[in-house]
Amino acid sequence: MKKLNIAYVGFGKSTNRYHIPYVKIREHFNITRVINRSLGKRPEQAILEAEGTIFSTDINDIIQDDSIDLVIVVTPGAAHYETSKKLLLGGKNVICDKPLVETLEQAEELVGIAQEKKLFFMPFQNRRFDSDFLTIKKVLDTGYLGDLLDITVTMDHYRPADATAGKNFDGAWYGHGVHMVDQMVSLFGQPKAVQYDIRSTRDSNAVDDYFSVNLLYTDFRATVQATELAALKRPKWVLYGSRGTLIKENVDQQENDLKVEIFPGSDGYGADAPQDFAQLTYYNQNGDRIEKSIPTVLGDYGRVYDAAYESLVNGAEKLVSDEQILTVIETLENGFFYTLPSIKIAIHFLKELKDKMLK
């Protein structure tokens, strides 16, 4: 099996929690280089150096290294655009952490550079491999629900004292919404229209910490919502269809396991307990009411890397298409089309995406 040499730009918590543990259990990747502004602060550096990874502070070390097949950008979000652009112009394939960039214009520019240079470029949309999302996809595919009427996904926390100042890019809509919008776009494509309610609820001078956004499709509504003031969390997923209802109360367990240093490859990693399975109620063709638990499909954030490998080595289509990249960023940016002091509400009809893909 061909191995890909990869490099990281950024070596903080996200790199060491959401990326490297998954790469280390995959034989087809070799971590060749890591670039970070400061070195020697994390114990993981010594472990990787002992395995042959080269650490330095200059991104040009990656650009000038012809052995690098793929670069993963895991810098603070404000640096995503410039870092990705420099790497693409330097001829490197790139995966960039979320949120990819702040504006549609930036996204279009980066996609255009990658297409012109025939490079791989994609955001790290790892929550396409959340266990709860994979379970929802499975239920939708089975047809238990009949015609979908309404689907809602929620990301709730209780953090009453964590309000911070910043820009739109720093708030909950970009930080959390990017995942949920991407999940809906991956399932259903570009919405016909979008209704926005985005607020700063803990401090009117802080970044947004609440949103309830409706993605409107021809025959159903997809709602993505979050708050930082949920003393009692809402179900993660609620789906209504013409023949049934599905409720999934709890979130994917991968992040919870990683936080307590239970890593991919460990027994039971990321697995739901039976009491956390989704609950389905539906009516079958005979009109019988059926209630059943749906075992959770096992999640695996490392499948983003597997998909990238298949694209780079075997020519498979990208996991996140260029059209999906642009749709997600446009949807995020349009959330701030209208602004009031402490509440941002807009109803914005997305223009049809023109053929922005270079041939």
Image (cartoon, grey):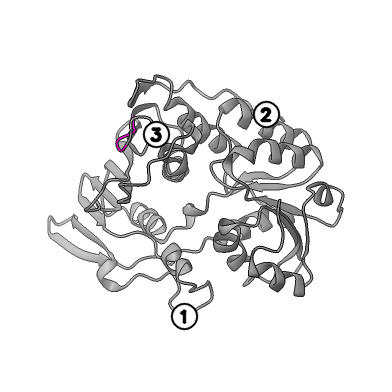
Kindly tell me whether residue 315 is visible in this rendering: no
- Crowding around mark 3 (Cα neighbors within 10 Å: few <14, some 14 to 19, many 20+) is many
Q: Front-most of 140 and 79?
A: 79
Image coordinates of residue 85 in percent, x first then y, are 72, 36
Q: Front-most of 27 and 78?
A: 78
Q: For mark 3, what is the residue? A: 206
- Real-space CA distance between mark 3 and mark 2, rounded to the nearest whole angstrom: 30 Å
- Magenta region, residue range: 198-202
Q: Front-most of 142 and 230?
A: 230
**Residue, x 79% and y 37% (percent of image)?**
89
- Real-space CA distance between mark 1 and mark 3, rounded to the nearest whole angstrom: 42 Å
Is 46 placed above or below 124 here?
below
Image coordinates of residue 239 in percent, x first then y, are 26, 48
- Real-space CA distance between mark 1 and mark 2, rounded to the nearest whole angstrom: 43 Å
Residue extending farthest to the bottom is: 267
Q: Nearer the viewer, mark 1 or mark 3?
A: 3
Res. 224 image quadrant: top left
Image coordinates of residue 63 in percent, x first then y, are 82, 47
The amino acid type of the residue labelled 1 equals Asp
- Crowding around mark 1 (Cα neighbors within 10 Å: few <14, some 14 to 19, many 20+) is few
**Helix, strand or loop at disc 3?**
loop
Q: For mark 2, what is the residue? A: 109
